[in-house]
Image (cartoon, coloured by chain):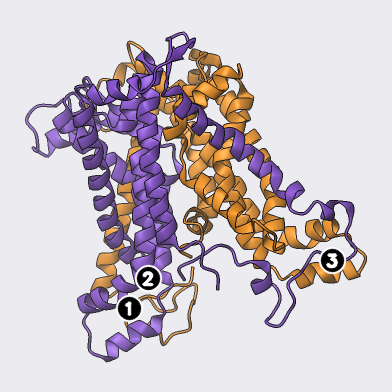
Amino acid sequence: MSLKAPPSPAESGRGRGGRAPRPRSRRSGIARLGPLPWIAPVILLILVVVIWPIFELVRTSFLNISIAGIVRGSAGTDKYKKLFEESDFGSVLVWTVIWTVVVVSVTMLLSLALAQLFNQRFPGRRITRWALIAPWAASVLMTAIGFKWMLNRTAGVLNTLMLDLGIIDNSRDWLGSSSTAWPWMMAVAVFVSLPFTTYTLLAGLQTIPSDVYEAARLDGSGPWQTYRHVTLPMLRPAFLVGVVINLINVFNSFPIIWAMTQGGPGYDTSTTMVFMYKLKETDIGESAAMSVVNFAMVVVLVLIFLKVSRWNEED
Amino acid sequence: MATATATRGSTARTPKPRPPKKRSFKPRTLVITAVAWLLAALFLAPYLEMVVTALRPKNELRDRTYLPQNFEWSNFIEVWKESELGQNLQVTLLVAGGATLLVLLVSLPAAYYTARMRFRGRKLFLLLVLVTQMFQPTALLVGLYREFHQLGMLNSVWTLIFTNAAFNLAFAVWILTAYISSIPPELEEAAMVDGASRFGAMVKVTLPLALPGVVTAVIFTFITSWNEFVMGLTLTTEPDKQPLTVGINNFIGAYTVEWNYLFAASVVAIVPVIVLFAFIERHVVSGLTAGSVK
């Protein structure tokens, strides 16, 4: 199950004992060039759109650039100093950690339950599973705007519903202050993360052979015991991959907060990504410095992913 | 999807009888069914509310009701006349279509070669691709903005096509490589013995067999580019050059938000992708987790 790069041709295609398909002796002109004609376009696109911006990013963080975009010489490490001395920097950092940890943990826990549920046999399993993918397929921005509307003070359906159910006495401006905006935005982030995570865990569940369950049953293990001692340990690879991919996604998440509060009031509901975007309006150098910090964080998460996914293992 | 369930007795039966022969509604099954359907409704609810809002007449927008008294179906047509969103939809179509085509053109040969040949740097190439998938555009926004600003390519459809294609390449290369590797090369060799060229064998033999992978890559790229927001927001400034997501977001900035129009446009943008996604749902996980979970 837990896997690895696509198997290289020698192992997969040919049966054992088969020779690796070396480029054949009657090489055509193209074959002599080796892999380049085949993979160069991919590399080129990655260089221009992914690698170059990384370089630009770092460069910009050491420059003085006017709002009009004119470079006014080197800034040394001034932009980093300015960033770290921002009065909101500390709280933005703390909230980013809280945001990421809360959203990912709640997502993982709920997905475990959802995966278990949707792995059962019941009438309408296909249709209900299909409904589950809606927040995954739909634009996250539009979903977030939908929630913003549902939380609208005058006519939002969630306010109406909570009034009718007697949960609240007066309709509230949920997104107006950070103490209520954060939980709602976290809920939306969980909502849009659940489908992918649940499907990942469902895929993991399906790698568990049924005879393992049979054996557990014969040993007289109850459902909860079976879950803890058989299912959970065997689900570990899928679970870990789900955690890391969600960490990357949630840390990078921008549209939810941008659509619902724009990180405000002030910077009260900003993560470092939103903070970076807001700084871009006033000082692109400082914004770049924030981006470099964000990017470093992403690199750490990617390294963890590479370790967890064991992409490198071939059979 | 064949499933291994923990339900008692399921192992004794043949693995996957499509329509279960006898449906014994045990209380447990009943509870599971009820909860699952309830959850399904919950997941769809926000989108249904969007549909309801899209159908509200202007004078019922501020009403505290669950459903409007009159349904204004014409909102779905008026929105494209009353706003610039029609232009934005056009940009989105161009960007998503262009990016999908570019991804396919670029990733198919690469995936084919990587699946079929051993070459120096193969691992490195796959690593580069995988890492790109993990780097999302948000962290690189300032760099992207600076780069395309200097190239004088802000507000260009091409910029959005290139950037969307690049960030979706990884998924396509990865899933196509996995699919092509699973097709025995002997099939192609047989075709080549019969006189087909390597390229001919690839197009006539391998490609049709890898079709599920191709379809998955195509739909996934299209949907992701269709939904893309942050790069559109950063790399375009002129309203008529912006993709639909950005156009819809601009709606909120307006002094009075015309929610009915906003959601009429959103519904038009959302429904097709949910339907499309249903086709590839079962293949997507392996592509997104780089095969870590199958």
Residue at the spot x=51%, y=41% of the render?
B273
Disc 1 versus disc 2: distance between alpha carbons? 8 Å
| Chain displayed in orange | B
Instruction: Identify the subunit bearing mark 1.
Output: B
Q: Residues within 10 Å of mark 2 (few under 14, many from 20)?
A: some
Residue B65 seen in the figure = no
x then y, percent, for residue A242: 37, 56
Residue A91 seen by the camera: yes
Q: Are marks 3 and 2 in contact (CB under 8 Å)?
A: no
Distance between mark 3 and mark 1 Cα atoms: 53 Å
Q: Report the residue that reaches farthest toward the right.
A: B195
Q: Is residue A139 above or below residue A304?
A: above
Find disc 3 in the rendering and name its residue: A24
Tell whether label 1 touches label 3 (CB within 8 Å).
no
Circle 1 residues within 10 Å: few <14, some 14–19, many ≥20: some
Lower position in the chain sequence, tag 3 or tag 2: 3
Which tint was used for chain A?
purple
Q: Which mark is residue B7?
A: 1
Query: Which quadrant of the view contains residue B70?
Result: top left
Mark 1 in CB contact with mark 2 (< 8 angstroms)? yes
Chain assignment, label 3? A
The residue under label 2 is which amino acid type? Arg
Circle 2 is placed at which residue position? A121
- In this rendering, is residue B239 above or below B212? above
Where residue B131 appears, x then y in whole percent? 50, 48
Q: Does residue A134 sit above or below A259 in this rendering?
A: below
Residue A110: give x, y in percent of width and height. Answer: 26, 56
What residue is drawn where x is 42% and y is 46%? A136
Helix, strand or loop at label 1? It is loop
Q: Which mark is residue B67?
A: none
Residue type at numbered disc 1: Thr
